[in-house]
Image (cartoon, grey):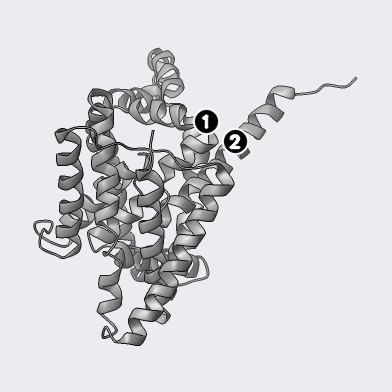
Amino acid sequence: MEYERSDVVVDRLELLRAYGYGLCMGAADALPGVSGGTVALLLGFYGRLIAAVTAFTPGRAIAVLRGYHPERRTRAREALLDLDLQFLLPLGVGMVTSVVLIADIVSSLAETHPIAIFGFFTGLIAASAITLGRSLELSSPTHIAAAAAGATLAVLVAADVVQLPGGGPAVIVAAGAIAISAMILPGVSGSLILILLGQYVFLSNELSEFVRAGADLLGGGSLAAVADPGATVALFVAGGVVGLVTIARVVRAALARNRSVTLVFLVSLIAGSVPAPLHNIGETYAWTTETVALTAAWAALGAIALFVLEFLVGGFDPE
């Protein structure tokens, strides 16, 4: 007698699909240019992503944790369904997979070939600002003011004129809160925010170090080697959780209230961020004619790569 569990097959396919979505979204967010939110829009799961993220509240989290009690299991089950964890968990694992792989590559190239990697990033950011800006209109003084505010803020942050207060753990938590919030927004890449805040290379190095130390620990390595980068990763994740339940909701409310002005601000933020990666090149090389030429060549390659991607997917749209 044959018995086919088609529901299990469907569930497994759904998990694999969500993991694949996470791989694509994580790759986009790990590189400045195309945001994870834009990828979610292009692949058709943005609405589900936002619904799941905004469903995350302290009340539902507590309800899930209290599910061990028999009388509270029904409420815990309802909370789990609201959180859509069967989608978010494989999506998150896929994102982490991509981010870890790309962070290791970036941290290595930042040391060995800074002109190539940061020149490429400059081109990605500039091209993404152009592709996203095509669909926006500066049709009122409010739109113009929002564009000026976004571009000016990004330029001031990139030039270290505006800085986060404090240092160390406070900056890491703040960077996590802002960057993770940006990851779910169409048009803004979380890695772009980290570059603006001067944390991108540092956090990429710490994540790569944490993964390597963890792998070494399984083979008999030192726990102390895991602790330091692990603390940085934990602080960033904690900041991300805070950002998802606070900053992300604020931005979503702004989009709901005045979508066109908010999008103009976000895209202008990207445009003003174009010079940000150049700071990393300037830390290692003097700006000679050769350095400028090499940077421009890599920037052109980055721009071409993004324009080709835009053509293949049929265009990017911040809406």
Residue that appears at 43% across and 63% down: 103
Position above or below: 189 against 229? above
Instruction: Please indicate whether residue 230 sits to the left or right of residue 148 in the image.
Output: right
Residue picked out by circle 1: 86
Residue type beneath disc 1: Gln
Quadrant (top left, top right, bottom left, bottom right) of the C terminus: top left
Position above or below: 39 against 61? below
Residue that appears at 37% across and 51% down: 130
Residue 76 quadrant:
top left
Residue picked out by circle 2: 15
- Camera sees residue 217: no
Counting other residues with Cα less than 10 Å from the Cα at mark 2, is it few (<14), some (14-19), or many (20 or more)? some
Q: Secondary structure at mark 2?
A: helix
Where residue 94 is drawn, which disc sits there? Answer: none
Return the x and y of residue 25 as percentages of the image width and height.
48, 46
Q: Secondary structure at mark 1?
A: helix
